[in-house]
Amino acid sequence: MSVTDPAEPGTPDPGSPAATAPSQVTADPQAAAAPKAGSDPPSVIDPSRPIRPADQPSRLGALEAAVRARTALVPEVGIVLGSGLGGLADDLDEPIAIPFADLPGWPSATAPGHVGRLLLGRLAGRPVVMLQGRFHIYEGNDPGLVIQPVLLFQRLGARIVVLTNAAGGVDPAFGPGTLMVIADHLNLTGRTPLLGPNADDIGPRFQDLTDAWSPRLRERLHEAGRAEGVELAEGIYAGLLGPQYETPAEVRMLRTLGADAVGMSTVLEAIAARWAGLEVCGVSLVTNAGAGYSGVALSHEEVLAAGAEAGPRLARVIRRFVADLPQS
Ligand code: HPA
């Protein structure tokens, strides 16, 4: 797929949200020069330019200021809610909801099933930040934008991030409704958010990814599952670019490579979260058997329906996981 015009690297597709969102994103130097009230420092956000690691600190400064203009809550945990898993947002007490379009440089999320809000509040009494909806590369978004939410979590004070997603089952034993704790990942997107000049004050040039998916937090997720009577599997998540689903041959290839589930998100966020020093864990909600296993065509509606069925189970596990975290 092509998300960029080769003549102008980083230019979003004309129909992509990054190109059309009525947000603070502007290519107009006049408009960009006028600082937006409440955003400090003012930054020129040019959607035609890729976002490099070295660009992140000033952008995060503007995002942090926009959040701090609305709430002083310091989250312990950041949670990314995947397709159809937005229900956990309803469990938030005293929520502050900020639409993506109100955050500098963020286009409104458009993937069906993704609302597009940043939420701060209390979950089981603990301060958390949630991303309801996320940015995908397949929407034409720059990898540097895809990771900004988790970098923002860290800026706001979070030390732990929980990444959730909808996924196809690559292990034939993982049918619809399986909840899989992510033990490790395969980044098969062909992208990295760490390309270009580094921001050493966020993280190192050469990021280690051994134990990227925290053994300690994985065990805590399993404990939360046991406490809630919810069965949790564990396995390897393969992140692909999408947006097309895989061919049956690709699913067999992924199995050979060691994957247990496949999806179109999460891996860049995990890389960036580790880079920023966050402890990472996550759960895939298997919404369908991988292409070729069941003999029926895959559809986004099926993915959303399975998310609606299994989402509440996953929500219980995450709520318990947060509630039982040791006080820091
Ligand atoms: N493949 C890729 N991504 C997905 C799938 C799938 O089968 N199901 C839900 N997200």
Image (spheres, rainbow, N blue to C red):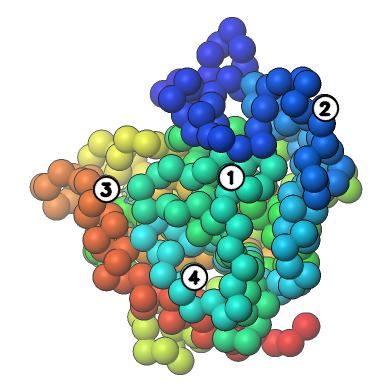
Q: Nearer the viewer, residue 225 or 143?
A: 143
Q: Kindly check if marks 2 and 1 are in contact, taking CB atoms under 8 A apart as contact.
A: no
Front position among marks 2 and 4: 2
User: Residue at the location (32% across, 63% down)?
Assistant: 307
* Disc nearer the start of the sequence (2/3): 2
Nearest to the observer: residue 195 or residue 2 = 2
Among all residues in the image, which is located at the extreme top?
7
Question: Picture coordinates of residue 200 (x, y %)?
Answer: 87, 44
Mark 2–mark 3 Cα distance, whole angstroms, equals 41 Å
Task: Give the vertical position of 185 relative to 5 (above or below).
Answer: below
| Separation (CA) of disc 2 from disc 1 | 19 Å
Q: Name the residue rendered at 53%, 26% in the picture.
A: 19
Dot 1: within a 10 Å radius of its alpha carbon, few (fewer than 14), some, or many (20 or more) residues? some
Judging by the rendered image, the residue that carries numbered circle 1 is 101
Q: Tell me the kind of residue under disc 3.
A: His
Q: Which residue lies under the disc numbered 2?
A: 33
Q: Which mark is residue 300?
A: 3
Q: Taking the image as drawn, is residue 214 in sight?
A: no
Residue assigned mark 4: 89
Report x, y in % for residue 274: 70, 55
